[in-house]
Image (tube, rainbow, N blue to C red):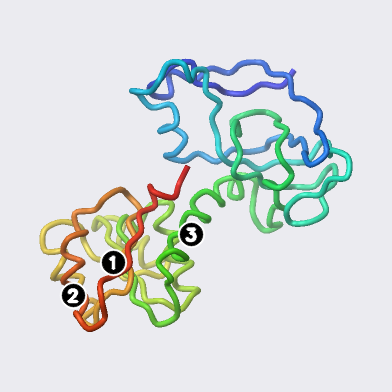
Amino acid sequence: METRWVAVDFGGPEVLRRVPVVVLPPKSGEVTIQMRAAGMNPADYKHFGPGQDPGLLPLTVGYEAAGVISDVGPDTEIASGGGGVGDEVVAFQILGGYASAITVDADDVVAKPANLSFAEASNLLLVGTTAAEMLHVTRVSEGDVVLVHGAAGGVGTSVLQQARLLGATVIGTASQSNFDAVRRFGGIPVAYGPGLQERARAVAPGGINAALGCGGRPDGKAPLRKTRPRRLGPPRRCYGEDIMP
């Protein structure tokens, strides 16, 4: 018998219960995956956070996971092509990834990169695709200067790396204790708090093309209007919380 974790109430980890579940065999367009690791993200605990409709309970948990295909529906291949029993894969965006096995749409499954462990791969796509979408909607490109709020978090570090690959200069707000992490992932760290406007202007005297918030609505939102010369127009903005599940 397979098992999965469900939230039987709203709250913290104490509301999670491990329960038996029957995993249905895959139909055409589906695969069954024996899970090896599940991604853990803020979106997961927000999913069963306090103050929601009790009629939603119980709630399955887990938007992404990694494992091994154990069964394939008729005439089915995964999103990255192919897909057979024994293949190592990543599944995203799914519901119920905190499970020992799950049957999901094959379109939500891709081959696991061989150089990543199951644990690493299971936490790759929610933050990675959120970061990629933020960069896409703000049209970040080579030569841009990007200000990333919450740069040392999961989405923030992915934004730093992907923006650098696009050829952008990235400034990341963080606490002093996380400056080394911002530097390690290709960003120029600046401290949170009063004086952020002046610090950002000192690092980017030519202005900022895009401002990305990876940790909620930052206190630096208003000052950004003054960090970019008028002739260049207002910075493009995007908040990860508007994109994540």
The one of 234 and 216 positioned closer to us in this rendering: 234
Name the residue tied to disc 3.
133
Answer few, some or many: residues within 10 Å of disc 3's Cα (few below 14, many 20 plus, some between 14 and 19).
some
Q: CA distance from mark 3 to mark 2?
A: 26 Å
Name the residue tied to disc 2.
201
- The tag earlier along the polypeptide, 1 or 3, is 3
The one of 235 and 195 positioned closer to us in this rendering: 235
Name the residue tied to disc 1.
189
The one of 163 and 227 positioned closer to us in this rendering: 227
Looking at the image, residue 77 sits to the left or right of residue 44; the answer is right
Tell me the amino acid under the disc marked 1: Pro
Quadrant containing the N terminus is top right
Q: Where 88 falls versus 140 (above or below)?
A: above
SS for dot 1: strand
Q: Where 146 falls versus 25 (above or below)?
A: below
Which mark's residue is nearer the viewer, 2 or 1?
A: 2
Name the spot of residue 113 as percent of width and height, x first: 68, 57
Asked if the residue at tag 2 contacts the one at tag 3, i.e. Cβ–Cβ closer than 8 Å, the answer is no
Q: CA distance from mark 2 to mark 1?
A: 13 Å
